[in-house]
Image (spheres, helix red, strand yellow):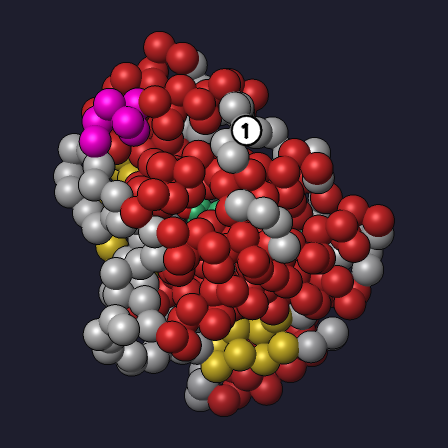
Amino acid sequence: MRDFVFETQMPRVVFGTGALQHLPRELDALGATRALVLSTPGQIALAQRAAELLGPKAPGLFAQAAMHVPVEVARAACDEARRLGADCAIAIGGGSTTGLGKAIALESGLPVIAVPTTYAGSEMTTVYGLTEAGAKKTGRDPRVLPRTVIYDPELSLGLPFGMTVVSMLNAIAHAAEGLYASDANPVIDLMAEEGIRLGAIVLPALQRDPRDVEARGEALVAAWLCGTVMGSITVGLHHKLCHTLGGSFGLPHAETHTVVLPQALAYNAPAAPQALRRIAAALGTPTAPGGVFDLAARHGAATSLAAIGMREVDLDRAADLAVQTPYPNPRPLERGAVRELLQRAWEGTRPD
Ligand code: NAD
């Protein structure tokens, strides 16, 4: 039996088909009257819809959110919030947009309402990231946790299936690492198992029909559960590797999680057999690493680092960076074994 400490800090969650309509009510509940709506350039139409719902209570829209929150973008958004006298930020989009909302909260303490349209799960964590001169820094701060999260399955109906798959594998990665985290607890374990189970079963349904609103709803529940797990535990080797590969080699976030997860699980398998059994059971597959690999491959995702833009000559440096600073992981970090893991990930070898 493990010792554990259980403490929760969660946003208010409003879930439902068409739940975006509750945005004015949720803004009022925070006592806010001047919201700055945030999005990427590609989701500006959705951000405009949100702003229209709020009328004069949304005096501004900042649609320049970008992957990994470049500091220049964060500064520009903070300036805009100050100029408008904003008392709330509404982040509508994927993890990049949520990340921009968090950057504003970190600087100004403004409350954030997150309206996620992918499965990245950032809305449930106190983790923030900022990229300056090509280097990504992350940290934890309770101020950045959104106060309210609105999950509306209608808003992800148009998420392309390819992005749907890798985003869900990103979610599953949070839950998988939760099951062997040193600071997990029985409640988090349940959330992790259910998040993985739901994530795995919705992908075939969404492959058949990406506009299946029921399945989109279940996918958001999976994202919520998996994000909550990540927000509650200390992540290990898998997230560290993805952070290194994304931050230092520019690899795409969710795609990198998809490729690395089976290999990281195989690395940790000897040291975390019980967690691996639970992941496999949730996936409904004989083993966890093979099950995750097949889930990605079956739904058309890339399964090698080579296919997502990593150069083989950079693997040595990636291995060095990944073991540079110690962090908790079930199996000790051995540079040679991590280098082998990266080779298999680069080649896309299916683990057992
Ligand atoms: P993203 O937010 O970068 O989105 C990718 C693209 O898809 C964007 O152009 C976006 O506008 C578009 N998009 C989003 N939803 C869409 C939809 N429903 N339909 C059509 N297009 C849509 O990608 P992401 O994977 O959600 O987030 C990745 C970022 O989030 C990374 O920077 C990562 O570090 C961060 N993240 C942070 C945490 C945390 O806890 N801090 C957790 C997970 C991810």
Q: Secondary structure at mark 1?
A: loop
Q: Is residue 241 visible?
A: yes
Task: Give the magenta-colored segment's residue range.
Answer: 334-339
Quarter that holds the N terminus: bottom left
Q: Main secondary structure of the magenta part?
A: helix
Residue 127, x across and y down, in percent: 32, 58
Q: Nearer the viewer, residue 245 or 35?
A: 245
Is 160 left or right of 40, judged from the image as shown?
Answer: right
| Residue in view at x 57 percent, y 59 percent | 282
Residue 170, x across and y down, in percent: 51, 48
Residue 7, x across and y down, in percent: 29, 80
Is 263 left or right of 320, judged from the image as shown?
Answer: right
Q: Nearer the viewer, residue 11 or 187?
A: 187
Is 59 left or right of 217, judged from the image as shown?
Answer: left
Q: Amino acid at mark 1?
A: Arg
Residue 152, x across and y down, in percent: 67, 69
Q: Is residue 235 covered in magenta?
A: no
Q: Quadrant of residue 302?
A: top right
On screen, residue 53 above or below 210: below
| Residue in view at x 29 percent, y 29 percent | 338
Q: Nearer the viewer, residue 56 or 127?
A: 127
Q: Which residue is mark 1?
A: 350
Q: Nearer the viewer, residue 316 or 190?
A: 190
Q: Quadrant of residue 317?
A: top left
| Residue in view at x 48 percent, y 59 percent | 278
On screen, residue 275 above or below 348: below
Number of marks in picture: 1
Q: Is residue 108 visible?
A: no
> Within 10 Å of the Cα at label 1, are there few (<14), some (14-19), or many (20+) other Cα atoms?
some
| Residue in view at x 26 percent, y 43 percent | 331
Q: Is residue 336 covered in magenta?
A: yes
Q: Quadrant of residue 213?
A: bottom right
